[in-house]
Amino acid sequence: MRAVVAHGPGALSLESVPDPSPAVDGAIIEVGGCGICGTDLHLLAGDLGSDRFPLVPGHEPWGRVVEVGREAAGVRVGDLVAVDPSLHCGQCGPCRRGHGNMCERWSAIGANRPGAWADYVAAPAANLHPLPEGMPTPVAPLVEPVACAVRGLERLAPEDDRPAIVYGAGTMGLVLSLLLQARGVGPVTIVDPNPARRAAAARITGLPTVDVAEAAELRAPSVVEATGNPAAFEQALASVDRAGTLLVFGVASPAARATVSPHRLYADEITIVGSMAILRSFAPAVDAVARHAVALAPLVTDLVSLEDVSAGLAAVADGSAVKVVVSPGVRA
Ligand SMILES: [Zn+2]
Ligand SMILES: [Zn+2]
């Protein structure tokens, strides 16, 4: 089969590699589409460690099951599925306490196991989630990012009919904003310093957008930091109303530091929560994407072939695209 292989930072090539075969409890999926996300940029830059190379990236796939292992339960050849990329050991302390996303042996398809920028990808049957009848497949690559957002909103626990502010008009900021609006939180205001990104955010979500200076006047009980920028974190924290909650969703550099007033956390009863990847939120995300397919569809702005993955990565990096989907069925 064809697969995009990363051999090290900046060294990406389309190669012919052996077809995968299913584990006894696994399946092979013919990839219909797989998103490119910011995590892939970090991964390919080597920010997440060079011990991952060589690697076939791609952790947001959907596709058709073409082969199943002897003991694969609940999945049949021909099923259309979305793939949860998270692989938890189930045995370690965090796994046994129900925190699989904190697994001591955490791994993921497309992060340190072969991913889906390829014709086929292997996955455990337990990680496959059938697409609901009638769900438009162009939105299927959004299930994985929506699963991360659903987990984040569970941590935020926003109140209906109360305002929310989302810092960051990147893909995840827009996903989070649309899901907040869909569950009756509002008005939702999106903050971004980049006028082109604000314009795209307004067009895609129909929500009000403001620049950073205008946002200084805003307060809301639910605020989301989806940029990873420490200055944005500080402003997002300042935007939290008394007794409100800040969700830290953006991925800051491990070395980043921000200033927090302990007095304000005390006096205003501010809650700060973090959220990392997916935890029991994949099945709810399949439902959410099916239900809100019309609202979410404009997030998918670009489809690229396996040959054009580098162009897709560039469009994600410079912000000219929202969600770029790698589609092996698209020929260059
Ligand atoms: Zn991702
Ligand atoms: Zn574990």
Image: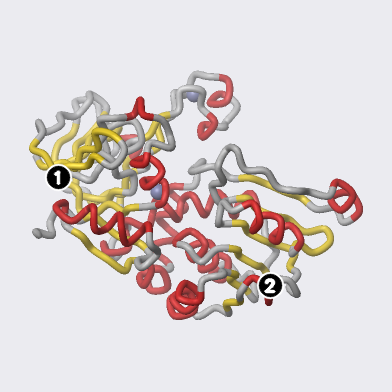
Who's the residue at 54% across and 67% down the image? 177
Q: Picture quarter containing residue 324? A: bottom left
Relative side of 148 to 81, left or right = right
Q: Is 99 located above or below residue 116 in the figure?
A: above
Does any portion of residue 143 appear in the rendered image? yes
Of callouts 2 and 1, the N-terminal one:
1
Q: From the image, tell me which residue sits under label 2.
A: 215
User: What amino acid does circle 2 point to?
Assistant: Ala
Left or right of 191? Residue 36 is left
What percent of the width, then of the height, locates residue 248? 63, 50
Secondary structure state at the residue bearing disc 1? loop
Q: CA distance from mark 2 to mark 1?
A: 45 Å
Picture coordinates of residue 229, whole percent (x, y)? 59, 53
- Residue sitting at 73 percent across and 68 percent down? 220
Q: Position of residue 281 (x, y in %)?
A: 49, 47
Quarter occupied by residue 115: top left
Give how far across and how far down residue 34 sits, in percent: 27, 52
Amino acid type at circle 1 is: Asp
Q: Which residue is mark 1?
A: 119
Number of marks drawn: 2
Horizontal relation, residue 105 to residue 254: left or right: left
